[in-house]
Image: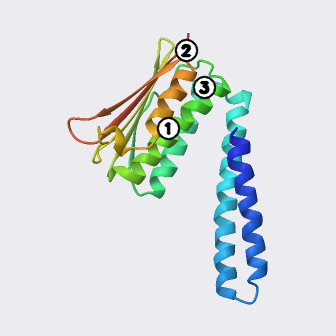
Amino acid sequence: RDLHDNLSSDITHLALLSDLAQSDVKNPGKVSQHLDQIFNLATNLTRLVDEIVWAVNPSKDSIKGFVSHVISHAQNYLLAAQIPCRLDVPSRPEDHPLSSTQRHHLLSIIKEALHNIVKHANATEVWLRISSEEQVLRIRIEDNGCGISTDPASGGDGLENMRRRMESIGGSFERLNQSSGGTAISITLNLR
């Protein structure tokens, strides 16, 4: 689904931008703008392909590899947004297997949560907490931003999509407004 939805539309977009650049060859300003867009889209496509390859690579089917990948992604994403990312993760996580489907859904939820923080929360700090004990994986993402409205009409489908993703792999999802301000997203997956 991701290959079809993301890659095919982005490749079509690349072709369109290339055509536009060729048709605007007599207008250097527009050509430069199209080339910048092509570069940004190609960079995003490279990242997307790397993530898809990571998600289906059976050598990465463990909590240890997953935690390492999530830490790297969270820190890089939040660094680009100039939001410090604090970590509370085990130095030696329980090395239990995770299927590619589990890893894919977990990573998609984490990415959506981080995107929401950057786009909506006005946060100045994020905590990524991961624990893996007694065959239960717990991930909590906390921010110190403005929180999420409790009015159901105020939001999109992102939170419901996260909940459905967790249910599809037998896990649970919870979103909390913290008393100190900000939001916490908590996901739990029983690995037994």
- Residue 102: numbered disc: 3
Question: What SS does tag 2 mark?
Answer: loop
Which of pointers 1 and 3 lies earlier in the amino acid sequence?
A: 3
Q: Position of residue 50 (x, y in %)?
A: 69, 45
Residue depicted at 52% across the width and 25% down the height = 166
Residue depicted at 30% across the width and 39% down the height = 151
Count neighbours of disc 2 (C-alpha within 10 A) and say few if under 14, some if 14 to 19, many if 20 or more: some
Using the rendered view, name the quadrant where residue 35 is placed: bottom right
Nearest the eye: 94 or 139: 139
Using the rendered view, name the quadrant where residue 154 is placed: top left
Count neighbours of disc 3 (C-alpha within 10 A) and say few if under 14, some if 14 to 19, many if 20 or more: many
**Do tag 2 and tag 3 residues touch (Cβ < 8 Å)?**
no
Residue located beneath label 2 in the image = 191
Which of pointers 2 and 3 lies earlier in the amino acid sequence?
A: 3
Which of pointers 2 and 1 lies earlier in the amino acid sequence?
A: 1
Q: Position of residue 3 (x, y in %)?
A: 73, 43
**In the rendered image, the vertical position of residue 141 relative to residue 16, given as above or below:** above
- Residue 48: numbered disc: none
Which quadrant holds the C terminus?
top right
Inspect the image, locate mark 2, and give the three-letter code of the amino acid beneath it. Leu
Residue located beneath label 1 in the image = 110
Inspect the image, locate mark 3, and give the three-letter code of the amino acid beneath it. Gln
- Residue placed furthest toward the bottom: 26
Nearest the eye: 15 or 179: 15
> What's the distance in space between the residues labelled 2 and 1, CA to CA?
18 Å
Count neighbours of disc 1 (C-alpha within 10 A) and say few if under 14, some if 14 to 19, many if 20 or more: many
